[in-house]
Amino acid sequence: MNKKSVKDIDVKGKRVFCRVDFNVPMKDGQVTDETRIRAALPTIQYLTEQGAKVILASHLGRPKGQAVDELRLTPVAKRLSELLGKEVKKTDEAYGDSVQAEIGTMTDGDVLLLENVRFYPGEEKNDPELAKAFAELADVYVNDAFGAAHRAHASTEGIAHHLPAVSGLLMEKELDVLGKALSNPERPFTAIIGGAKVKDKIGVIENLLEKVDNLIIGGGLAYTFVKAQGHEVGKSLLEADKIDLANSFIEKAKEKGVNFYMPVDVIVADDFGEHANTKVVAIDEIPADWEALDIGPKTSEIYQDVIQKSKLVIWNGPMGVFELEKFANGTKAVAQALADATDTYSVIGGGDSAAAVEKFNLADKMSHISTGGGASLEFMEGKALPGVVALNDK
Ligand SMILES: Nc1ncnc2c1ncn2[C@@H]1O[C@H](COP(=O)(O)OP(=O)(O)OP(=O)(O)O)[C@@H](O)[C@H]1O
Ligand SMILES: O=C(O)[C@H](O)COP(=O)(O)O
């Protein structure tokens, strides 16, 4: 990576404003998935060991510029403190006199967590005044929030213009893994794209078609491609305005010599839900009143075979409605194939695919699970991430 990292600078005795992505799921005031907190630990531990005063900042949810009690970071501070094995104080604001006073009491190696930065309207507007107010709290800025790097906000982008600005260790690792995969992939290189909508994946499919050897399509978005191939899709998800685009992707794959895999069979249901009647049908036999909610067993086998023969696989988006047991098999088959293929470097592109791999207890079998949902998607689209662009060059 051509950006400076926290290891390239001296942080001893310095006040470090470290932006992390602690946007974690919570229920009844408890963190229900602490993956993102754990992922930030290496940077936090490195900073404390180096004798920095660590001032952590994060967003949580989308409070739209006002304080929302359920979106306070207090439970996160508690969990972080347990994971670090040391006290983590938390402020009720994210900048200003009370925060300055609290920082004034810190000694080297202390860790402080600021309140949710999205409680202030200036955060998402990237207000220069708020960016300056954040910068006044510290001597150095470290961005470890890969998951929020696609946002040009005051704490992810604006602040970097006021302080020496470097990446954290998680940010560095995410950019290295995803960057290397896209610029210098081991081959055969396979991308698996699923999820709900073609609309959300256009950029990724376009960019990956330039790079991969195999492109596998699954999930709700597959049925627009199925329709484009002239088959009826019944009540399955369909974006009628994207049929031509789907066709152009299939054509482009042919031109580029990319093997394009689509479902050959599917699980159809007569209703959406666990109670529905289901059956396996060939792709050209989807009944008019039924809806395809997962890929079928033959398709799973073909996809598993392609995965086994690949050296590198990037996966974004589930193959079916994996949240429901009846429609989880296709997604499970892909996850299991990645887990079994020990010679294959597997990159899970965050979001729902990461949640699926967790759900199937296969997370520790994957080579890299990105902590970014939208951020990893934008990276895979080949877009520059504002939170990265703003950091100091090496
Ligand atoms: N055949 C299908 N019909 C309807 N919905 C489906 C189908 N296959 C998958 N889905 C749904 O798609 C959703 C995931 O789509 P999405 O595009 O958000 O995925 P993602 O890109 O992995 O997630 P994120 O946006 O969080 O990165 C899941 O909730 C899943 O139930
Ligand atoms: O969960 C995420 O993808 C990141 O934390 C960014 O959150 P946002 O989509 O609310 O900006």
Image (tube, grey):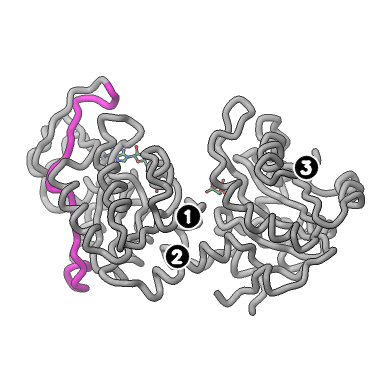
Q: Residue at x 70, y 51 (%)?
A: 123
Q: Residue 224 in the image: x percent, y percent?
A: 23, 48
Write the residue at 33% across / 45% down.
Answer: 318
- As drawn, is 141 to the left or to the right of 252? right
Lateral position of residue 66 relative to residue 13, left or right: left
**What element does badge 1 sit on?**
loop
Residue 370 disc label: 1
Disc number lying in front (3 or 2)? 3
Tell me if residue 248 can be seen.
no
Which residue lies at the image location 33% right of the left edge and 72% below the top edge? 186
**Label 2 is placed on what type of residue?**
Leu
Image quadrant containing the N terminus: bottom right
In this view, the residue in front, 328 or 377, is 328
Distance, label 1 to label 2, CA atoms, is 9 Å
> Taking 340 as reference, is 386 above or below it?
below
- Amino acid, disc 3: Glu
Whether residue 108 is in magenta: the answer is no
Disc 1 residue lies near ligand 1 with CB under 8 A: no
Marks 1 and 2, the one that precedes in the sequence:
2
Q: Which residue is drawn at 13% across and 30% down?
A: 279
Q: Check disc 1: other Cα within 10 Å, few if <14, some if 14-19, many if 20+.
A: many
Q: Residue flagged by tag 1: what amino acid is it?
A: Ser
Identify the secondary structure beneath mark 2. helix
Q: Do the residues labelled 3 and 2 touch (CB within 8 Å)?
A: no
Q: Earlier in the sequence, mark 3 or mark 1?
A: 3
Pair 3/1: label in front: 3
Q: Residue 84: percent from the left, percent from the top?
A: 69, 46
Between the residue at mark 3 and the residue at mark 2, the CA separation in whole angstroms equals 34 Å
Q: Mark 2 sits on what residue?
A: 178
Q: What stretch is highlighted in magenta?
A: 252-274
Q: Marks 3 and 1: CB-CB under 8 Å?
A: no
